[in-house]
Image (cartoon, grey):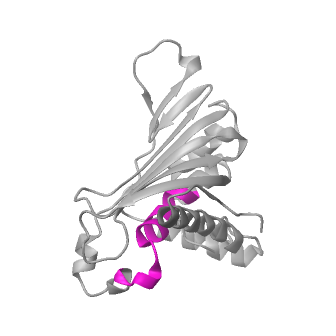
């Protein structure tokens, strides 16, 4: 089992249900941001391996994996990515601390993923899904069925914080062991998210759009 905690958050599960049940209509655009200042961690002694050049584009692989996995889980598989990056804050590392990736999903959905692990600001992992019948922006919801209103409704779920859903994840894992079930995020699911991360890293290096290979 791979630990992508966002899948275990009630808000994200509610958004997935809205999409699966057709309440948002057909998805047309999806975006997610992972913003988390890693400077305090790099200044300590416990995360020095993050600096290693052989780890590749760590901001994408270590941070961007979470919003990318969430988008895959809710919207569908990624087909192609095109990315740009820069390093303005974390001069002590060899990877870009800010990355923007344009995404092409299956079924004609387009999207965006922002990863920022350098800029000083509080943690956030934002998620938005725009559909033909409604839109979700974090815990804000608008459905066409609401009529001509000028404000979003608020869903009864809190936003994602830096705290991880480790307890819920572990309970799920133990239950899968006890009952002989596949976990929500098995090794193949985890590998498909890594494939998306590696495609973004390749696009950063080449300056070209890169296909995401997930047929395994």
Main secondary structure type of the part rendered in magenta: helix
Residue 154's spot in the image, x, y percent?
Answer: 43, 33
Residue ranking furthest to the top: 148
The answer to whether residue 156 is seen in the rendering is: yes
The image quadrant where one finds the C terminus is: bottom right
Horizontal placement of 15 versus 118: left or right? right
- Up/down of 43 relative to 96, above or below: below
Residue 63 colored in magenta in the image = yes
Q: How many labels does the image show?
A: 0
Residue 134 vs residue 106, the one in the foreground: 106
- Up/down of 9 relative to 30, above or below: below
Residue 148's spot in the image, x, y percent?
Answer: 48, 12
Residue 58's spot in the image, x, y percent?
Answer: 43, 73
Q: Give the residues drawn in magenta, as a range.
A: 51-69
Q: Which residue is drawn at 61% across and 45% down?
A: 16
Residue 101's spot in the image, x, y percent?
Answer: 48, 53
Residue 82 vs residue 136, the one in the foreground: 82
The answer to whether residue 7 is seen in the rendering is: no
Q: Which residue is drawn at 59% across and 41% down?
A: 110
Q: Residue at x 70, y 46 (%)?
A: 106
Q: Residue at x 67, y 50 (%)?
A: 76
Q: Quadrant of residue 59?
A: bottom left
């Amino acid at each position: 089992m791979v630990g992508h905690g966002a899948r275990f958050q009630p808000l994200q599960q509610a958004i997935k249900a809205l999409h699966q049940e057709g309440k948002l209509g057909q998805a047309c655009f999806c975006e997610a941001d992972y913003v988390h200042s890693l400077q305090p961690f790099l200044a300590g002694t416990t995360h020095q391996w993050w600096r290693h050049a052989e780890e590749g584009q760590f901001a994408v692989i270590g941070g961007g994996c979470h919003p990318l996995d969430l988008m895959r889980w809710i919207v569908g598989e990624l087909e192609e990515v095109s990315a740009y990056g820069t390093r303005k804050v974390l001069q002590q590392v060899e990877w870009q601390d800010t990355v923007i990736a344009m995404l092409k999903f299956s079924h004609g959905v387009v999207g965006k993923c922002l990863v920022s692990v350098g800029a000083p600001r509080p943690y956030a992992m934002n998620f938005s899904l725009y559909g033909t019948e409604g839109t979700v922006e974090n815990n804000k919801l608008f459905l066409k069925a609401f009529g001509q209103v000028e404000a979003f409704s608020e869903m009864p779920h809190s936003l994602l914080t830096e705290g991880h859903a480790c307890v819920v994840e572990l309970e799920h894992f133990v239950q899968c062991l006890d009952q002989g079930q596949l976990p929500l995020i098995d090794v193949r699911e985890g590998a498909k998210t890594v494939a998306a991360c590696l495609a973004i890293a390749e696009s950063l290096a080449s300056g070209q759009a890169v296909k995401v290979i997930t047929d395994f």
